[in-house]
Amino acid sequence: PIEQNQTNIPSKKIATEKPKEGLGSFIGKKEEELEKKIGRPSRIDETMYGYQWYIYNQDPNEYLQVGVENQRVVTIFAAGQNLDVAPFEIGQPVEEIFNTNYIDTNINLDFNGNSYRFELNDTDLNLRPMVQLGNVFVQLYIDKFTGNLSSVRFLDGATLIKQRPYELVYNGYLIEAPDPSEEMKREIEEDTEQEIFDITNVLRIRNNVKVLRWDENTAKAAYQHSQDMSENNDFSHTSKKFGDLEKRLKTADVAYQAAGENIAANYTDGPAVVEGWLNSKGHREALLNKEYTHLGVGVFQNFYTQNFIQKTEQ
């Protein structure tokens, strides 16, 4: 007989209803309810998806991005370890999450008479599985090096379809994000650069490493590298035109003792990029390196560059 090893019934009740408490309960609510509860954001960032990110970065342990579209909350990205992301917890062991939630390889969604199916591959299931709680979709970013939950993203159905973080099969009409103007695109890139900077420092604090300061010349070098990779469709640390990191930093008049670089392409946004880097050994080492003192981030279209430096002592 075939052995069945799926018979262990989790002791906790599996949650399938929309969160009634915590940040997930704000999905679909009006922006004024959000502000009444958690106050005004420190800044408002533009995105490629039609909503604006309300950025709460005053306390790294409560770092939060809330997506607001037409005065309603449509998505939330929570990375601060003191935030209430019920029924989950930042830092929660992955075994516990898999034991108390129904994790499926497919997420089915009917929206305005159209049907959508997101198909998660093995990497998705291990690093960024998704759970459906009522009409709220929850993407869980797992830190594979600690085996714990690193951050959480709550989304409504329309926003999930617009972002398409997984392979998508659909019948009917595909909801597309509005196409921003060229001017707006650069604003989105600059805002994303700041989010990557913020989230990097959230993760450094979590790992007991001192925060990095922003360095404008290093950021310019990073931006030029992202632009160069995009325009030449050449994903590499060495540019055919501008050379390696050492050469590019020298050209940008950056004085440093040590330097490192992370690059990425084709992620949905800033939070997704940083979580991707965190789960890659070499990128993680740069993110959490104790020697680095400053960071510059450059985003061009869907190419991302982080340049880390240890400043020369004055």
Image: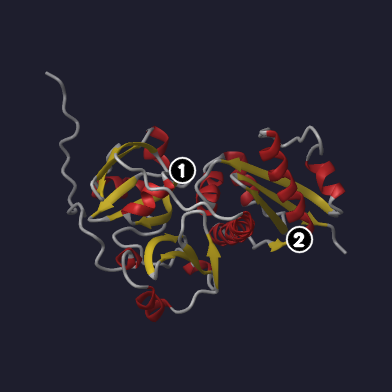
In the depicted view, which residue is nearer to us: 21 or 156? 156
Q: Residue at x 33, y 68 (%)?
A: 26
Q: Residue at x 33, y 46 (%)?
A: 130
Q: Position of residue 308 (x, y in %)?
A: 71, 52
Q: Position of residue 19 (x, y in %)?
A: 26, 62
Question: Dot 1, how many residues are within 10 Å of its Cα: few (below 14), some (14-19), or many (20+)?
Answer: some
In the depicted view, which residue is nearer to us: 26 or 128? 26
Q: Amino acid at mark 2?
A: Glu
Determine the secondary structure under disc 2: helix
Closer to viewer: mark 1 or mark 2: 2
Which residue was labeled with disc 2? 216
Q: Position of residue 72 (x, y in %)?
A: 36, 68
Q: Amino acid at mark 1?
A: Lys
Which residue was labeled with disc 1? 144
Q: Marks 2 and 1: in contact by CB < 8 Å?
A: no
Mark toward the start of the polypeptide (1 vs 2): 1
Question: Dot 2, how many residues are within 10 Å of its Cα: few (below 14), some (14-19), or many (20+)?
Answer: some
In the depicted view, which residue is nearer to us: 47 or 78? 47
Q: Residue 206, which numbered label?
A: none
Determine the secondary structure under disc 1: loop
Q: CA distance from mark 1 to mark 2?
A: 32 Å
Image-quadrant location for residue 229: top right
In the depicted view, which residue is nearer to us: 121 or 172? 172
Q: Quadrant of the C terminus?
A: bottom right
Q: Residue at x 17, y 40 (%)?
A: 8
